[in-house]
Amino acid sequence: MVIVDLDGTLVGCNSFTEFVKFAFRRHPGLRFFLILTIMRRKLRLVSHHEAKERIVSRTRGLVTEKELDDFTVFLYSRINRKVLDIVKSDSRAILASAAPELYARPFGRKAGISVISASRPHEAENRGERKLADVVRQGAVFDRNTVVITDHHDDLPLLKANKEGLNYIVKPSRKSLGILLREGIRFTLLD
């Protein structure tokens, strides 16, 4: 089984930032709302999660299936081929992300991944312990045949649970690398 993160791992970008840019370009009527929400976030008047929740809630009814397909095509163009090869080398994979399921689910299908663990509307963000619990709920078993691929220390619970398996870390920040080393996580670096 392969459990793979999305942002900075399976794709070489922050998918939500790209989604906001996409919505801004495609829906001029949303521009003022998006700018205002982003400004509130930058001024720390709202949390990252709250800003994301507001944007997803507002765009959910506006973004068409065709637009979601266009967006997932764009994300697929940013895919990390080495990571995708590892994902496709196993018959069972889970895309485990804090990204909204609004586009994580169709993107996962496009990448050949049918099991998706993503942030759902009106729930806590799918990260850390919550992400671990969700992948376990969806059938993840951590043993010597399990592979976890991520770029960030937010996935420490997944990496710790996979102590018998193989962990790949994709282009980590210095901070994430330091935390993983301090926590004694065994891993292999991946471009």
Image (cartoon, helix red, strand yellow):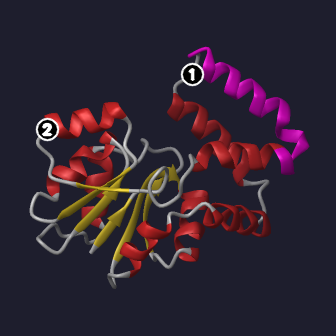
Residue pushed farthest bottom?
91
Q: Quadrant of residue 72?
A: bottom right
Q: Indicate the secondary structure of the residue bearing disc 2.
A: loop
Whether the magenta-drawn stretch holds residue 33 is answered as: yes
Label 2 or label 1, whichever comes before in sequence order: 1
Q: Amino acid at mark 2?
A: Glu
- Disc 2 crowd, CA 10 A, few/some/many (<14, 14-19, 20+): few
- Disc 1 crowd, CA 10 A, few/some/many (<14, 14-19, 20+): some
Q: Amino acid at mark 1?
A: Val
Asked if residue 4 lies left or right of residue 35, the reply is left
Rendered view: 42 above or below 66: above
Which residue lies under the disc numbered 1? 46
Residue 145 drawn at (x, y percent): 17, 75
Residue 67 drawn at (x, y percent): 78, 63
**Residue shown at the point (51%, 50%) measured from the top left:** 99
Q: Quadrant of residue 162?
A: bottom left
Region in magenta: 25-44
Rendered view: 76 above or below 168: below
Q: Indicate the secondary structure of the residue bearing disc 1.
A: loop
Which residue lies under the disc numbered 2? 183
**Residue shown at the point (60%, 46%) measured from the top left:** 16
